[in-house]
Image: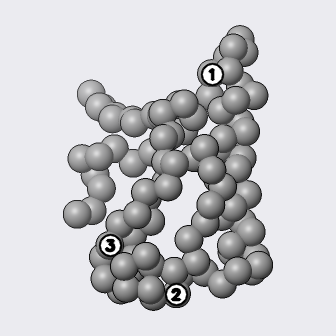
């Protein structure tokens, strides 16, 4: 017998995106209602992204697309879910 654990979330389950600084470990949560992107750590000011770079534009687009897809799929005859790593398998 094989047992498989899958963890799926709906777009409506995505309330925000957490950023964790690689320098100081500070965590910052941005809700998906805005498309704000952090360029540096709010605590230690380590640089994360440079404005107007491909990386910054991609991140801004991602946050915008999550919000847009959530709104456009509401009330449709199907649902869409994202497969994520189960919490029990996440590194600490």
**Residue name at image x 75 percent, y 28 percent:** 72
Total numbered labels placed on residues in the image: 3
Of mark 2 and mark 3, the one earlier in the sequence is 3
Q: Quick one: SS at disc 2? A: loop
Q: Which quarter of the rendering shows the N terminus?
A: top left
The residue carrying mark 1 is 79
Question: How much space separates mark 1 and mark 3, taking CA atoms?
Answer: 34 Å
Left or right placement of residue 84 versus residue 89 in this view: right
Provide residue 17's location: percent of width, then percent of height: 49, 54
At a point 30% along the width and 76% down the height, the residue shown is 25
Q: Tag 3, which secondary structure?
A: loop
Mark 1 or 2, nearer chain start:
2
The label nearer to you, 1 versus 3, is 3
Disc 2 target residue: 47
What x and y, as percent, mark residue 9? 47, 34
* Residue 29: % across, % down: 43, 57
């Amino acid at each position: 017998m094989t047992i498989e654990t899958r963890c799926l979330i709906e777009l409506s389950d995505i309330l925000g995106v957490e950023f964790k600084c690689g320098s100081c470990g500070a965590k910052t949560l941005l809700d998906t209602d805005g498309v704000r992107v952090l360029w540096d750590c709010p605590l230690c000011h380590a640089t994360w992204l440079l404005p107007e770079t491909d990386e910054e534009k991609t991140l801004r687009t991602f946050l915008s697309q999550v919000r847009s897809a959530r709104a456009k799929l509401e009330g449709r005859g199907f649902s869409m879910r994202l497969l994520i790593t189960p919490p029990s398998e996440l590194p600490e």
